[in-house]
Image (spheres, rainbow, N blue to C red):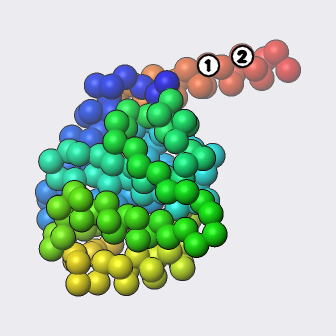
Amino acid sequence: MPHFSVAEYDQRVTGTRRAMAAAGVDALLLFKPESHYWLTGYDTFGYCFFQCLVLTADGRMTLLTRSADLRQARQTSTIEDIRVWVDRDGADPVAELRTLLAELNLGGCRLGVEWRSHGLVAADGMALQAALDGFARTEDASLLVSRLRLVKSPAELEAVREAGRLGDRAFAAA
């Protein structure tokens, strides 16, 4: 169950789509677990494995994650379209992402990529760049969602205040 209301997540997606339009990108390839969490509530233990949340300019969201993370993605997020790759010898999640992007008709589009993320290791990043070469244009969008996260909504501020109250109570009890 996500920690915030669906309306809160919808507002975050709407704001992100506005920022995408201002940046001139048709879709975002989001690899930062904190971006997944902020936009959808998806709270993963698999942050060190290949996972990509694709957000298109029209608001479609598709998550590509390991099969082991499917249940958690379903239970903690607002994402309806969840695709899995199976973590086995010879697995190629980058190729699966490239196929997904083609299914979403993103060929020839301008894709913002969160290149600066511990969720996208160097080998996968290089493979992704090669897979997208000639398919779509890419640009670094590593800070697009991060900048939006800086301004807290009323719901986020209340959660921070409640965390402070709980911390004070725990300190007093200790």
Which residue in the structure is indicated by mark 1? 165
Residue 7, percent from left and from top: 28, 25
- The one nearer the camera, 110 or 170, is 110
Residue 158 x %, y %: 45, 22
Quadrant of the frame with the C terminus: top right
For the residue carrying disc 1, how many other residues have a C-alpha within 10 Å: few (<14), some (14-19), or many (20+)? few
Query: Can you give x and y, in whole percent of width and height, for residue 114 in the image?
Result: 39, 65
Residue drawn at x 42%, y 30% as measured from the top left:
156
Q: Amino acid at mark 2?
A: Arg
Q: Position of residue 38 (x, y in %)?
A: 42, 41
Residue at image position (60%, 51%) is 46
Location of residue 44 (image quadrant): top right
Query: What residue is drawn where x is 58% and y is 54%?
Result: 47
Marks 2/1: CA–CA distance: 6 Å
Mark 2 sits on what residue?
Answer: 169
Query: Given contact means CB atoms under 8 Å apart, are the residues at marks 2 and 1 in contact?
Result: yes
Q: Taking 10 as reference, is 119 above or below it?
A: below
Q: Secondary structure at mark 1?
A: helix
Q: Quadrant of residue 43?
A: top right
| Vertical position of residue 150 compared to residue 3: above or below | below
Residue 147 seen from this side:
no
Query: Disc 1 residue type?
Result: Arg
